Amino acid sequence: MLGFCGSAQVLTVPKSATSAASLGLLVCHSCGQLSKAAPGVHEAACSRCGAHLHVRKPNSIARTWAFLIAAMICYIPANVLPVMDTGSLFGSQKDTIMSGVIYLWTSGSWPLALLIFFASITVPALKMAALIFLLLSVQFRSAWRPMARARVYRVVEFVGRWSMLDIFVIGILVALVQFSALATIRPAPGVLAFGAVVVLTMFAALAFDPRLIWDNMRKQNG
Amino acid sequence: MHATSLIACHECDLVQREPQVPAGGVARCACCEAELYRNQPESLDRSLAYTLAALSLFIVSNTFPIVGLIAQGHLIQTTLYGTVRALYDNDMRLVAGLVFATTILFPAAEIAAMIYLMLPLRLGWVPPWFAQVFRLRQAVRPWGMIEVFMLGIIVALAKLAHIADVVTDAAMWSFFGLIILLAAAAAKFDARVLWVRASLNRA
């Protein structure tokens, strides 16, 4: 009915696309081997590499939500609390991520300001929004453009790591700017919250099972 | 059911026959276009060569200073481990742990695991704990972030260039090379070839 699987290109695939799960096959997430599961069994060990096999990632939706909500909570202190404390002879100055971006912008380094703004503020926010969208679409059994949603998931998986940028920058600054009385840079508590956001959103992306997007399509199609 | 000739997409679970791919080509899922595998000529030889080269640069990157600052006639330098240490000493132990894991521990584990898997296979035998080490490599892969750290160095340098003289050091350049070699090693790494070789060598 709906041609979402381009079955014309691949002659070996039956007209109604068949998932491994519906054939009682388990695919190994580690080495790719297909294993035959005993009837009614949803878990096994991979016959080749021994990895734990399951039809779908267990409790994928609940676990993704849990990581995601934790990440959203940490996102607030990550942006409100200072991440860096610059001390000099003339007193000390606390910077949040956003005030650091604004400082870079006003001091003329706008490419750098854009880069940090994108990696530290936009990417985590978009990533969380994208995962909420994916989770809701799966939970409401949406049939809306699975291919587009699969691409959204791939982007989320790919960009997440780049949010670590600011943590590394602060680490390097802290290590280098140690002129005792003249100027020192120290990390401030916001860094911890920010690190938690990056790690939690990565865990959330890993907990989400993209096969759920397609399961709904195939069920609706019969 | 001949499980060997069938493959299931890891992203959408579609069962399909393993497509024949020309050398250098990519097999994509018929349903969601996710990459299933690449046909890499001499995958094992090339991936192993890149990984061994990456190991030597990884050692250089971790022993020499990356960048330094000159202010009031003093030179302050830092190594990769120095940034971890600086965070740790400033009561940011969890963050220090995170930086240590993503830039030193996990990349080291990935390089070590790949050499452990490929070098003995190349010499014609299967190392013990082959499956466990293979799974370890797959598990740590998303958490190695050397390329993000490299961008972090560049941003930090650009920020500091306003206030002090900045000097780049040996590890900075070996980092560049390391990123390229690790990406090449991962691109040439073909898990399917590895398992075929392992089963041939066992037989």
Image (cartoon, helix red, strand yellow):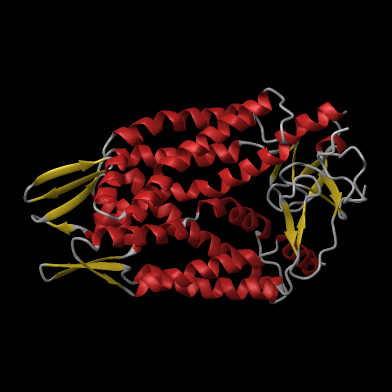
Q: Is residue A15 left or right of residue B134?
A: right
Point out the image quarter for the C terminus of chain B: bottom right
Residue A140: image location, x then y, percent: 68, 22
Q: Which of A33/A99 is in front?
A: A99
Residue B173: image location, x then y, percent: 40, 73
Do we see residue B92 in this rendering? no
Residue A200: image location, x then y, percent: 48, 37
Residue B85, relative to residue A117: is it above or below? below
Q: Residue furthest top?
A: A140
Q: Is residue B6 left or right of residue B65?
A: right
Q: How many marks?
A: 0
The residue at 85%/62% (across/down) is B20
Do we see residue A17 in this rendering? yes
Residue B113: image location, x then y, percent: 58, 62
The residue at 72%/25% (across/down) is A141
Residue B63, relative to residue B88: is it above or below? below
Q: Is residue A1 left or right of residue B132?
A: right
Q: Quadrant of residue B65?
A: bottom left
Q: Which of B100/A168 is in front?
A: A168
Q: Quadrant of residue A192?
A: top left
